[in-house]
Image (spheres, rainbow, N blue to C red):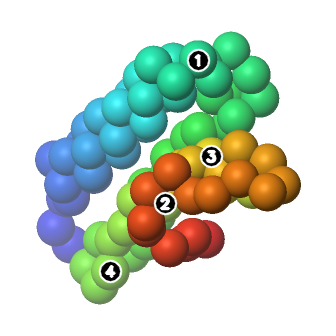
């Protein structure tokens, strides 16, 4: 059986960079001190012979913050559709 240590390390490195970038964006938007900031995480999952993946996790309202929703009656800051 092959050893996929380097592959797993590469996926973990990608996950760390994406989480770091997401947290930097939250800090830049003055949202870097709350529960959402602390909830952004990643996990390397899957069978490395078939379908490895990096799964990103955050609190449920993170998708709203990502699209620019500020509250009721506000318009989207950008035109991207909301993704879960």
Residue on which the image places disc 4:
51
Q: Does the residue at mark 1 contact the one at mark 2 (Cβ under 8 Å)? A: no
Q: Which of 23 and 47 is in front in this view?
A: 23
> For this rendering, which residue is in front, 12 or 17?
17
Q: Is mark 4 on a helix, strand or loop?
A: loop
- At 37% across and 67% down in the image, what residue appears? 53
Which residue extends farthest right?
A: 72
Cα gap from disc 3 to disc 2, whole angstroms:
19 Å
Residue 81: percent from left, percent from top: 50, 73
Instruction: Compare marks 1 and 2 and give the one earlier in the sequence.
Output: 1
The residue labelled by disc 3 is 65
Q: Distance between the residues labelled 3 and 4?
A: 30 Å
Q: How far apart are marks 3 and 1 (CA)?
A: 12 Å
Q: Which of 74 and 66 is in front in this view?
A: 74
Residue wearing tag 2 = 55
Labelled pair 4, 2 in contact (Cβ < 8 Å): no
Residue 46 on image: x %, y %: 43, 71
**Residue 45 visible:** yes
In the figure, residue 28 lies in which quadrant?
top left
């Amino acid at each position: 059986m092959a050893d996929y240590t380097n592959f797993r390390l590469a996926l973990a490195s990608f996950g760390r960079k994406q989480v770091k970038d997401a947290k930097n964006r939250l800090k830049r938007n003055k949202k870097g001190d709350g529960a959402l900031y602390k909830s952004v995480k990643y996990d390397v999952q899957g069978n490395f012979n078939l379908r490895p993946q990096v799964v990103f996790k955050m609190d449920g309202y993170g998708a709203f913050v990502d699209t620019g929703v500020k509250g009721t009656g506000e318009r989207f800051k950008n035109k991207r559709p909301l993704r879960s």
